[in-house]
Image (cartoon, coloured by chain):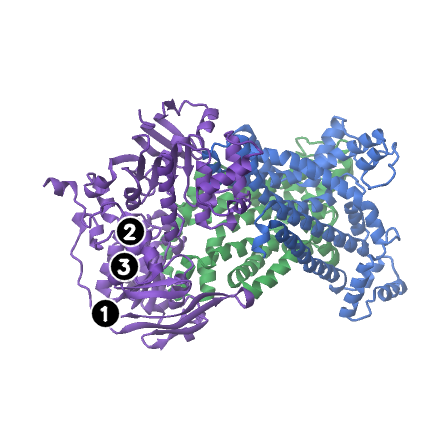
Amino acid sequence: MAAPGRLKVIGSRLLQAIPVVIGVIIVTFILTRALPGDPAVYFAGTIADEESIQEVREALGLDKSMPEQFFYYVGDLLRGDLGTSLMTGLPVAEELGRRLPASLELTLVALIISCAVAIPLGILAATRPNSLADHACRVLVTAGVSLPTFFTGLVLIYVFYYVLGWAPPPLGRLDFIFLEPPRVTGFFLIDSVLAGDWETFWGAAKQLVLPAVTLALFTLAPIARMTRAAMLQSLSSDYIRTARAAGLNGRTILYGYAFHNAMLPVVTTLGMVFSFTLGANVLVEKVFAWPGIGSFAVDALVASDYAAVQGFVFVMAILFVALNLAIDILYTLIDPRIGFDAA
Amino acid sequence: MSLVSIKNLAVAFQTRKGEVNAVRGVSLELERGETLAVVGESGSGKSVTSYALMRILDRGGRIKAGDVTYSGIDLRKATERAMRDIRGREISMIFQNPRSALNPIRKVGDQIANVLVQHRIATRQTAKAKAIEAMEAVRIRDAEQRYSAYPFELSGGMCQRIVIAMALACEPRLLVADEPTTGLDVTTQKTVMDLVADLIKERGLSAILITHDLGLASAYADRVVVMQNGVIVEEGASEMMLVRPHHPYTQKLVAATPRKGAGVRDLLPEEARTPLPDKRPVGAPILQVRRLRKTFGAGANAVEAVKGVSFSIGEGESVGLVGESGCGKSTTSSMVVRLLDPTSGEILFRGDDLATIPASRFTRDKRRGGIQMVFQDATDSLNPRHTSARSIEDPLIRLSTLSRAERAAKVAETAALVGLPEHLLSRFPHQLSGGQKARVGIARAIVLEPQLLILDEPTAALDVSIQALVLNLLVDLQAKLGMSYLFVSHDLGVVRLLTDRVIVMRGGEIVEEGATADVMDRPSHEYTKSLIEAVPQPRMIPAEPLSANAAAG
Amino acid sequence: MSDAALTPPRQRGALSHIGYVLRSNPVTMVAFGLLGLILFVGVFGPAIAPYDPLASNAANALQPPSAAHWFGTDNLGRDVFSRVLVATRLDLIISVAAVALSFVIGSVLGALAGYYGGIADKVVSRALDTIMAFPLFVLAMGIVAAMGNTIENIIYATAIINVPFYARVVRAEVNIRRDAGFAQAAKLSGNTDWRVLALHIFPNALPPLMVQVSLNMGWAILNAAGLSFIGLGVRPPTPEWGIMVAEGAQYIVSGEWWLALFPGLALMLAVFTFNLLGDGLRDMVDPRMRT
């Protein structure tokens, strides 16, 4: 009887994302057009003359009224038109599309690493208070959130590249001795496996380790803290006592009962963690010269390439909305109660 | 040989403030087929004793000393694996607040099936069928459908049946029931307790019933032990315990238990029983409620919580408003005290219709001080950041024209009136006991000398001995100050003690109204009858329990 | 003040309570000690710095740490130690100003939404959701890019992206206390709605809020430093931790570690200190911790 309720909830979650997307569009519109100063000057770039500024003004419709401009802006977005990058002269959408897989690959690998470490650590810390794992978890949680990603990245480079020489030079996704694998997904790890090119796979993996670990270190802390807190709370719940009194064995209680319940708040935290990760991604990409959308945006910022920066902000927001939606739906699948309070 | 034998059990908890000894040398025996009740107030160590027996103490707790044997097995020395086989298979347990005792995100049937598989009573293939059998055994109808339900989809009573089914699924020999009726509605309490008693009899189980309620204990148990501060103070056959309690604490507890025929003063220890003040005659109506209605929400989701109730309260009169949770009694009292705006109807207070003034504006009305309220949970009703004095003074600051010195004098005077020692005035709520907090709450409510005081289950969160003190305080205050009371409660035993007239509500409507004695002794409505029957009837509880001294003398 | 009668003893109590909290938890003691050090450097940094943080000396460039230059010198021969000290003030100003702004705005919005519910709640929640729909650092980048690349705009951008955290905590804390017994009792005592909110409910939301303040201070510092690391806000040669790490970054691969390490450590220490403060601050504003 839960299934129709859940489908309904998933449907309503999808609907709820619509006003958020509208909000994102309004905010990016305000950031591009509605702020003081002449956007045409920004968009034309620093070296533009009077004539080209006028051209840009007409091309962007800046001579029209605000509502009209908004209308045009939404129309452009719907067509996938994010404007043209001053730096490269190519459409921003194309530039971002080409670089997106690099950023996604880095982010996803980092998240996998950090969940694989943080969740077991949080569980251990909660089940064995005052053990080594508990102390490690506490130190990590406090120190982890104090780490500036760009700084940890530099320290890792110094230690593993300069001193130990284990890591390749921090210059992009693949050393120049390798050829990029034929593009299927855009993820080098996956594409090289698909092409059966194991050398390229290892080459890409080596490049990926340091930036991914840097990013993972940053997200470890919130996930470990939440896992520990959620486990402690569910372990002290009444239903755990019931389960113990019924003679269920430790493993069933720990994983079937406590962890399953603890997953709910942890999944919710993931949304916030994604926000941090996508932001920190920009810094890590800059440190490791990673050719993703973050380093593209940083270059655009320095070059005052406004269309590129705003396009980047918009794409990141849409990506984040989509991730949150995925988390919400995942949550709905874990928690049977969801279909009912909404109905 | 007895089934369970506990000798000199000591249990301690490691807390931030150091070690706390929750159980200090408890010894008890349970014979086969016997039902033993362990009675005590909060903090007496009664639940901890049972957790120690099953070795499921909360984190930080450990058995410091003593022997615990079950059927000849030393439970302290048993391996964790052996304990697991005993739990649920030999000794089972049911808990208070059944809804939270079940895993919220697992189908209830699966939770029972887990236990069956764990104890190898069933295989994965047969578990479902066996679990449904176990559910049917505790008289759950449509067990097959209920199997796939989640706890939040079931009522509290149904959740408790599931917990019982889980406990009895593997046919244990000993059932430990830890406050099994706490958190359930009055009528459900009765059904659940009767079911448990039937099952115990049917299966020839031994049982330990842990409760704060002496009445419940004596109604269902063969033998009673009374615990206080981690030690057993008295032990005996349940009927003797109530008739001839020996230990002063038991005497106090027996006396404080509301029962038929006993007055409010009878709840106090003998030496504290001052003569009851003369009851003032009931005067002209001070409050008249007419066709009061409250609808929450709108359209298809609208819920009519109160469906046009009318009643009145005379000057100096005590009126009880009784019903189970969800009957609309709290909504009604919130409207009367003007915290909530009614959808329609009149609230005439000394002739003026207060219903026309929005609640948000009434806070500054000069009649605000005339109607005050004592809240259900004293802890929740005191601002954690305010000292007692500040809490009591607050109404004076806002609604009186007294100077600072006059206010301080008034606070001291009121504190004395409710029996709150002066040195407690500078304390914060977390530094006070439950009874002290209740006194602060009462002092705040009466500091403006209201004519009408609404008492919203003022003793629901208190232990019986404290309840006895607070009830007597309320009676004395009414006699001294001539206030009218609207006493909102689900507890008929308490309502009987305090009120002249009683109104019974169900589903937002008044189903019965009349003089308290008449309604209690000769209820005319079926619902009232079921409410009264639901109060556990001790086997033989005299109005005036004989104390050991009296018997000897 | 109508409750002035009770103020003097409470103030004494508050001071001794702070002392009690400090003594009872060594971590809090350490955190407040570090805070004192950071504040001291923030105020007196320029006065105690051994060298002019802007004075370059090409002959003395890229020297490793030594007795004369504790943290070494950078590519222009400037003293890294002096620059780290002097940078403290700017980093503190940015983060304190940003957190103060978001604290005030977030508290007001959250309190109104949590107390009144209904439309106010819907509008506020919708606006917060929109901000939270962006990865926050990315939004800050967008705001600074659009509003102009200045230090004030770094502060505004950091403040805006922090508002939802405060507003949500306050909203939740106010909401659970809206119908609490003591709030209802305050109404019966003749307190108007806004008094109930401001004097009874909001102060009780302070303890959890303090934890948020301390975590956010750290995060605000990280955020501002991150923005300047990618070249926003602070411009060279102004000493600031983020930009110093960025300038030092290119020398890491050639082994001149001290350029980036020391400003990075200073940054970490500051963030770490603020994160540690949380529990202590909470205990200080929580009367329940008094014994």
Q: Position of residue B345 (x, y in %)?
A: 41, 74
Amino acid residing under circle 1: Val
Chain B: what color? purple
Judged left or right of residue C130, residue C171 is left
Q: Label 1: which residue? A: B282
Q: Which chain is blue?
A: A
Q: Colour of chain C?
A: green
User: As shown in the figure, which amino acid type bears the numbered disc 3?
Assistant: Met
Identified at 48% across, 36% down, the residue is: A243
Q: Secondary structure at mark 2?
A: helix
Name the disc covering residue C255, or none.
Answer: none
Disc 2 to disc 3: CB gap under 8 Å: no
Q: Is residue B70 visible?
A: yes
Instruction: Tell me which corner region of the image, top left, top right, bottom left or bottom right, holds residue A155.
Output: top right
**Image quadrant containing the N terminus of chain C:** bottom left
Q: Chain of mark 3?
A: B
Task: Name the kind of residue labelled 2 in the image.
Answer: Gln
The answer to whether residue B199 is left or right of residue B133 is left
In percent of width and height, residue C94 lies at: 63, 51
Q: Quadrant of residue A133?
A: top right
Which residue is at the front of the view, A187 or C43? A187
